[in-house]
Amino acid sequence: MARSANSDLAAHELRVLVAVADSGGFSAAAAALGLTQSAVSHSVRGSERKIGAVLFARGRTGARPTAAGRVAVAHGRRVLRLLDALTTEARAAARPDTVEGPLRIAAFRSAALHLLPPVLQRLRARHPRIEPQVRIVREVGRGTAGEVADGKADLAIATLGGSPPLPPDLVAGALFEEPYALVHPAGHPTPRSLPLIDWAENCGSYTRTWWADQDWIPKATVEAEDDGAVLSLVSGGHGMAIMPALSLTAAPESVDIRDLGPARPTRRVGYVTTAELAASAGVRALVRELRGAAGAS
């Protein structure tokens, strides 16, 4: 049976769904879109009829996406991004030397601080009309790759080989492998006797296996939100930590860094994007610069 065109969601309907999800309510979405609340409600009801599922749970405190709504909003973001990219991609095809428009990047903290700045400097030098937008996302759970899957980022700097696995509709490429090292207060004679300072982060199965085999590593007595806080605590003499190389870039003189030996754990860092955006001019230009930086390191 042929699918009716009337059952397809239009771009304005997708924008309403995304606005409701982002703002947490129909009134706030209406204000953001310059519509009335009744128009937003009517649009959402129409989308729900077309899809055949309730997309938002309504309540006194607003509206939150149901399981079906989360899927619809994620796909809606990605469809809208492709529509936004249509004009810039057509221009790039007509003028191959021109890359322009927004480029949304999600990165974990150490990558945003130490990897991206020189990469984006070279990218903008070659393509002055490109508009990078960087968001720092904690690399826990779905992490930065989840931002791409949800349509919130075009490309993510991510830890590869971790858990959960990448969704099947995303593509990834490795950039480099960074070693972990022991970091401790400078001059401490027996750093392995110190309390462990740790933080949650995605890591590969090899790193987890290595960690489990080390009987000298105690259970963490201090846990921090990110690697910057960990490094600050170690610098202040509160314990030792095991950290990847990016996190130790420009480490203060108040800490010492010790190699963990030839069997040391490593972390694979790469990029993640969608199959559709992998061929876009902006993403391809960024990947070239990332690969260049990885090869030079």
Image: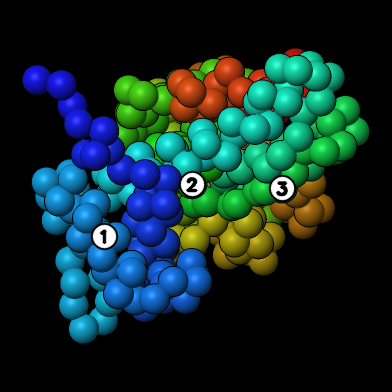
Labels 1 and 3: the sequence-earlier one: 1
Residue 245: x, y in percent?
Answer: 65, 35
Instruction: Identify the residue position indicated by label 2 in the image.
Output: 152
Task: Give how far apart the Cα atoms at labels 2 and 1 are.
Answer: 21 Å
Closer to viewer: mark 2 or mark 1:
1
Closer to viewer: mark 1 or mark 3:
1
Residue 61: x, y in percent?
Answer: 26, 81
Instruction: Identify the residue position indicated by label 3 in the image.
Output: 113
Task: Report the residue at 48% width, 67% height from top.
Answer: 33
What colouring style does the render use?
A: rainbow
Tell me: residue 189, above or below residue 285: below
Tag 2 and tag 1, C-beta contact below 8 Å: no
- 46 to the left or right of 109: left
Tag 1 and tag 3, C-beta contact below 8 Å: no
Amino acid residing under circle 1: Val
Q: Secondary structure at mark 3?
A: helix
Of the pair 66 and 137, the residue shown nearer to us: 66
Task: Report the residue at 76% width, 34% height from top.
Answer: 100
Amino acid residing under circle 2: Lys
Q: Is residue 182 something that shows in the picture?
A: no
Q: Secondary structure at mark 1?
A: helix
